[in-house]
Image (cartoon, rainbow, N blue to C red):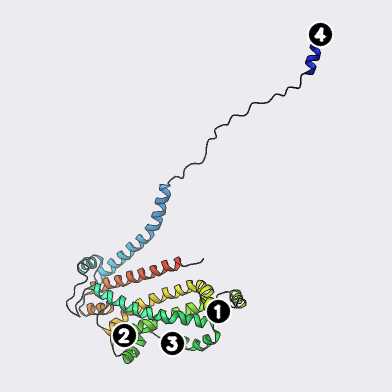
Amino acid sequence: MMSAVYETVQAQPDVKVVAPPAQPVPVKTTMNKPKFELKEKLADALRWVIPPVLGILAFIALWALVAQETENLPGPLKTWESAKLLFADPFYNKGPNDQGIGWNILYSLYRVGIGFGLAALVGIPLGFMIGRFKFLAAMTAPIISLLRPVSPLAWLPIGLLVLHKAEPASIWVIYISSIWPMILNTAVGVRQVPQDYLNVARVLNLSEWKVFTRILFPAVLPHVLTGVRLAIGIAWLVIVAAEMLTGGVGIGFWVWDEWNNLNVEHIIIAIFVVGIIGLLLEQGLIWIAKRFSYE
C-alpha cells in the first residue's frame, strides 16, 4: 500500500506556480492643459504698448512747451480742435480753389499712383535686364550714376517744358524720382542669384523666359519689393513739394494755400496726415513683402 502511494506521487508531473496576471494600474496623467498665462500676456502687451505711448506723450509735451514759448505756433490742444472742424466735412467742394482736405489727399494719391505705376512698369524690367546682362549694365551705369543724385524738383522745369501742363509735370517728377530704387534693387537682386542655378538652367537648355519665371523671379522678388517700398516713400515725399510749385489741387498745394492764409493749425494737421498716409503705404508694402518672402 505504501509503495503504491509512493509511486503515485512520483508519477505526478511538476506543478509550476504561475503568477496571476497583473491588473492594469490606472496611470495618472501628469500632462496639464495649457494654461492661459494672463500675467505673461498682459506683460507682453504692456511692453509692446508702453514705449510708443511714452514717446508720443513726450513729443506732445515738447510740442506744447515750444508752442507756449513761441508766438503764433499753435499747441496740441488748439490743433486738435481745428482738426475736428476740418474733418467734420473733408469732401466739401466750393470751386477749384476751395475744396476739402479729403479731395486734396485723393488728388495727391492719384498723381503718386500714376507716376509710381509708370516707374514700376519701366524700372523693374529694366533692373532685371541690367542685372542679367553685363553689357547693358556697363552701358547704363554712367547714366544712372549721373542722374540718380539729381534733386527731384530739378526735373520739374523739364517736365513743364516738355509736357506744357502742371498735372503731367507733377506725375513726371514722381516717375523720375521713384524709378531709381526699383532699377538698382532689382539689378542687385539678379546679380546675387547663385551662379549654380544659372549653370543648371544652361545645362537644361532652358529658354530665357523659363529662366526668368522659374529661377530669377522667385529669387529676386524680395529685392524688388524692397525697391518698391523705398520708391513709394520717395514718391509720397516728393509730391508735396511738387504740388507746392505747380498749384491746382493736392495736399502740397493745400499746405501752401494755408500758409498764405497764415492758418498754421492746418499746416500742422497736413504734416500729420502726410506722415500717417506715408506710414500706411510703407506698412502695406512691408506686409506684401513678408507674404512673398521665401526665407
Q: Secondary structure at mark 1?
A: loop
Q: Residues within 10 Å of mark 1 (few under 14, many from 20)?
A: few
Q: Earlier in the sequence, mark 4 or mark 3?
A: 4
For the residues labelled 2 and 3, the Cα–Cα distance comes to: 20 Å
Visible residue check, residue 71 = no
Residue contact between numbered discs 2 and 3, judged by CB atoms under 8 Å: no
Q: Nearer the viewer, mark 2 or mark 1?
A: 1
Marks 3 and 1: CB-CB under 8 Å? no
> Residue at label 1?
207
Please state the horizontal and vertical placement of residue 276, each as a whole percent of the image. 32, 69
Q: Earlier in the sequence, mark 2 or mark 1?
A: 2
In the picture provided, is 55 more to the left or to the right than 9? Answer: left
Q: Quadrant of residue 251?
A: bottom left
For label 4, the crowd category at 10 Å Cα-Cα, with few meaning under 14, some 14 to 19 and many 20 or more, is: few
Residue of label 2: 168
Residue highlighted by disc 3 = 147
Q: Which mark is residue 2?
A: 4
Disc 4 and disc 2: Cα gap in Å?
132 Å
Q: Marks 4 and 1, Cα distance to the nearest angstrom?
A: 107 Å
Q: Residue at x 31, y 75 (%)?
A: 109
- CA neighbours of label 2 inside 10 A, class few (<14), some (14 to 19), many (20+): some
